[in-house]
Image (tube, rainbow, N blue to C red):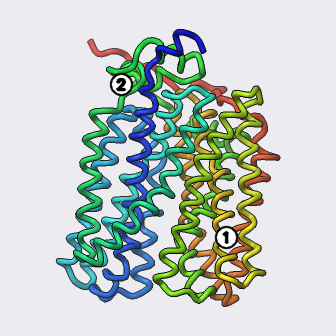
Amino acid sequence: MTTQQAQATRVRWLILAILFAVTTINYADRATIAIAGPEIKKLLGLSPVQMGFVFSAFAWSYVLAQLPGGWLLDRFGTKITYFFSIFLWSVFTMLMGTVGFLTGGAAVTALFCLRLAVGAAEAPSFPGNSRLASSWFPTVERGTAAAIFNSAQYFATVLFGPLMGWLVHSYGWQSVFYVMGGLGIVMSMIWMKTVYGPKDHPSINAAELAYIDAGGALIDLESKDKVAATTKLDTGSAIRQLLGNRMLLGVYIGQYCINTLTYFFLTWFPVYLVTERHMTILKAGFVAALPAVAGFLGGVLGGVISDRLIKRGFSLSVARKTPIVCGLLLAMSMIICNYVETDWLVITVMSLAFFGKGVGALGWAVVADTSPKEAGGLSGALFNTFGNTAGITTPIVIGYILQETGSFAGALVFVGANAAVAILCYVLMVGEIKRFEFKTPVITKLPLAA
């Protein structure tokens, strides 16, 4: 290690800690409706169809708002865009606690609209994470950074699931929304005080800035000069070129398939334990946390392995693809559950599958590696649009499979098959992983005001 590196500050790891905390709250707020759902259904007399619309509202608006969210990130920068994202989704979460003051159709409409608002407000979050990872972390650390903030989705289940359950039991369902929304508002204030681009952060020294710059970090991406209103992005041309690139399209489709596994665990997995494995709801609630722990550990490990491979001289393509392919092969093991009977073996196999999915969930690292510097937010938004479309399709497809077959056997095959398709995307379609460059310029300089 050089003297310059030895004396470098480590501000980038503080930025990552903030990203992890924000993403944990992000996923916890997504889960509030699931935790409070049974009590809301009972109190408001909602039908299963009405609850289904409420549950689906988040994914619809989240997907539709991805491209506008990416445009905002590229236009105004991550710091200010992400602040408003955190603040607004937290306010909308708090307002969901007031739905109990309404009745009938008004309550359902308010609940649905607020859930839509939460989804739309959260849209810039993960593309923002990707932009900050690109600007703050050199290539040899970027896999670990992306894996850590992405693993917060599992950590949220482990940390806040029991807390929110206790709040509903002790203080009523409204308390979940008030507490989690309030926590998010506090987090938005912390964000404004602690998050900056590398060139603008008051605590970074020249040694750290030189280290991350030499390692491939896009240190100008979040600078005040970069995000000033002096340029205009041709969004239409940028989207056409991004979608026309085979490497990026393979990454986007692969993320859709990977997220099919995620949404199976978030939606149907507890139902699988109760109806197919005949566990009690209490036991299923405890057991469902075990794969989440496994996913968290796998998620962090996948990033560490990837970065270790780079440090040992392997190419970026090999370093990213190896954990993805090996992890998703392991995730396909869930199909074995169709052939075993004992509960402990089912949970062991599912935890192994979720661990593998965590190892293979390096998509955000790949996005940080490949997104063009002119439109990093837009590329992340496209990636997240493809990925979270699975949040709409997966619950519906599995529902139809159950309706037609009366069994989860076909559902597990469907989810496992998506893991296989993701592998094929990375092996056959993505090719060499490298920074994408626009063939046709998409940035126009605006004239300065007199």
Q: How many residues crowd mark 2 within 10 Å: few (<14), some (14–19), many (20+)?
A: some
Q: Amino acid at mark 2?
A: Ala
Per the image, label 1 sits on a secondary structure element best described as helix
Q: Is residue 321 visible?
A: yes
Seen from the viewer's position, the closer of residues 333 and 102 is 333
Q: CA distance from mark 1 to mark 2?
A: 53 Å
Residue, disc 2: 229
Residue 287 has which mark? Answer: none
Total tally of numbered discs in the picture = 2
Residue at the far top: name it: 3
| Vertical placement of residue 298 versus 221, above or below | below
Residue 347 is situated, as x and y percent measured from the top left of the image, at 64, 73
Tell me the element at label 2: loop
Point 27% across, 33% down: residue: 193
Is residue 446 among what the camera can see? Answer: no
**Closer-to-camera residue (355/65):** 355
Q: Is residue 423 left or right of residue 388?
A: right
Q: Residue at x 25, y 41 (%)?
A: 189
Q: Quadrant of the C terminus?
A: top left
Expressed as whole percent of the image width and height from the top left, the position of residue 192 reads 28, 35
Mark number, residue 348: 1
* Residue 221 position (above or below residue 254): above
Cβ atoms under marks 1 and 2 closer than 8 Å:
no
Amino acid carrying mark 1 in the image: Thr
| Sequence-earlier tag: 1 or 2 | 2
Residue at 63% x, 77% y is 398
- Percent x, y for residue 286? 49, 74
Instruction: Classify 10 Å Cα crowding around label 1: few (below 14), some (14-19), many (20 and above).
Output: some
